[in-house]
Amino acid sequence: MDFSVIFSDALRSGIGPIAAVYALAAMGLNLHFGYTGLLNFGQVGFMLVGGYGLAVTVATYDGSMWLGVLAGLACAVVLALLLGVPTLRLRADYLAITTIAAGETLRLFYRSSWAEDVTGGVFGLQRFASDFYDLSPIPPGTYGVWLVEFNARDLWVLIVGWGLVAVVGVLLALLVHSPWGRVVRSIRDDETAARSLGKNVYWYKMQSLVLGGVIGAVAGMLQAIQVQSVNPDSFDPAVTFFLYTLLVLGGAGRILGPVIGSILFWFVLTFLDSALRQAIDAGYISSDLISTSEIGAVRFALVGLALILLIVFRPQGILGSRKEMLLSER
Amino acid sequence: MCRPRILLPALALALVVLCASPAWGQGEEVPRGRGFGARLLQALIDGVQFGVIIAITAVGLSLIFGTIHLINFAHGEFVTIGATFAFFLNVSPTGPGWHLVPAAIAAVLFGALLGGAVDRVIWRPLRRRGTGLINLFIVTIGLSLLLRHIVLVLYGTRPGSFAQYDIQETIDLGPVAITPRDLTVTLLSVLVLLGVAALLQRTRIGTAVRAVSVNRDLAEASGIDVQRVVLAVWMLGGALAALGGVFFGLVEIITWDMGFKLLLLMFAGIILGGLGSAYGAMVGSLVIGIVAQVSTLWFPVDLQYAWALLVLIAVLLVRPQGILGRRERVG
């Protein structure tokens, strides 16, 4: 087993573009779940409309990238309003079911043969990211420090991705420490108390849903650009569950929670993946027990286990405060 | 049970049929082998068949919600495990190669054991610790990921079907046709649902289950052993989910993620019927099954689940407590 390869794979993934995408999406989810207490299990739906908004505008209708970004953001706002109107007045369990159903319904519509002219159906869309890469000031080549190396394209996505994470993080920090943020947190802690103080709870929840959804849509666009294609099946409900895992890992209700969570999540996940692969190749683990093609599944099973153990034994994650995260029924 | 609540499901069914009726006039515009009426009837039969299978799996989910207010996102995995366990006993070269009937019975028993084990090992200790409900939802999500991918490792990605009753000639009943296998599955499902209803209405444990879901504290104060009732509900839910999985695998196909796909339809069914009500889950699931199948008359087949899920959102707008749900604050 070559530990330097395992370590560099893990490090590459932990600071890589995908970690930035997940950190961004989880920041939106953090606003929903960590600050407002909305149990949104359909964050992937916002990523989907964001990614497709960009891809459809550019690839299907030959629009410019900026128009695509606007379209993606607008789609996220519309989705949040559509989702919020029927569900935000309901109890947390209803919201959870509806959002998961809405995310899956969207995926089914985008991949259906009926929408194939616009969305490319099961094949998805490609060739819409060149505008983004044309903006890159980085000359082609590979760049590396110590154990990690990125090519110019990945490096550009990575810089933009973590740049967005920083900007959104600062904005969110200002927002949640403003009077608006205090109202939203009071809704999380005791909705009835907030209402009895004359706050329009429904409207605050709606604003939080829209804002977090828009952040999710930006993450979806970044993901679409990074893999240079959109495909409905990459917006599986499991993505939302990963977001929850890394959010709880980092600490919900903390600005840096999703960032640290995402870096650590992808580091550990890739570390396990790479280590398992090497262990099987080297014969430490019999390939009868786990074959190389099953590593992905083993990895996801471990994510599930980690989520259970985290919630049971350390619901506040790394950064959070235990008192805030002992959530009861709302 | 008061009269309007019985009328509502009938109204909902009538609505589904009425929505279909305007298209009768356009029968000529749909040049197919059979008339529109016949195709509608066929879709209704398919819908009932699909609906009763969803209902079998959803009843347990709804009862679990009714007794401990937990939405079990891992319920779909119970379905998959039931189907794949029966597949292992029935088809798998490493399995004993039993006939489907004993394999199905074994799968149902295994489902009951699994449900009971999950309650004893995970939920009861967590309830003792006083873990919040929201956190419990997230635990069920983790459990769902864990179980689903264990199934994926053990079963693999290849879709499968059982060794017996795989390909059958249809029997024609006037305008509609159904295979003996599907007919048997449908009738058996209806019998099982009636059995569950009888269990809830006539037996001591059934009465206790209903008492706990109406008012847990009062039930406990009147001497009902709530922990035992909850265990019974989990075992019943696990067994029914496994049975539903076997049935679904029989009439459709067995895949490693079949349960998760069914889970969303179960949610739609139980919300439509009213969260926590066993009979609501049955009626709601039936409507969902019919909506899914009837929608294929106008819309592409790959969207049939999506329409069923849209019904869920529509219901929340109009009548969030569902068809048979108790009118209570839901937000």
Image (tube, coloured by chain):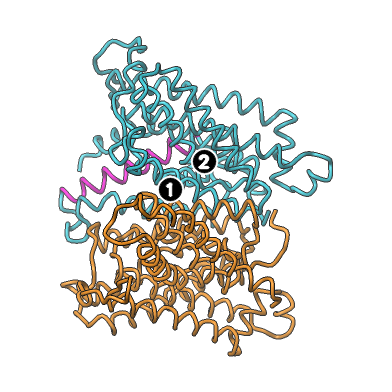
Q: Can you give x and y, in whole percent of width and height, for residue A296 in the image?
A: 29, 49
Image: A290 above or below A45: below
Q: Can you give x and y, in whole percent of width and height, for residue A241 in the image?
A: 46, 48
Near mark 1 (Cα within 10 A), the count class, few <14, some 14-19 or many ≥20, is many
Task: Name the kind of residue labelled 2 in the image.
Answer: Gly
Span highlighted in magenta in the image:
A259-281
Q: Residue at x 23, y 76 (%)?
A: B165
Q: Residue at x 34, y 73 (%)?
A: B247
Q: Nearer the viewer, residue B235 or A127?
A: A127
Task: Name the kind of residue labelled 1 in the image.
Answer: Pro
The residues bearing labels 1 and 2 have C-alpha atoms spaced at a distance of 21 Å
Q: Residue at x 59, y 86 (%)?
A: B205
Image: A194 above or below B89: above
Whether the magenta-drawn stretch holds residue A280 is answered as yes
> According to the image, label 2 marks what residue?
A250
Q: Chain of mark 2?
A: A
Q: Which mark is residue A237?
A: 1
Q: Is residue B220 visible?
A: yes
Tell me the orange chain.
B
Q: Is residue B132 left or right of residue A249?
A: right
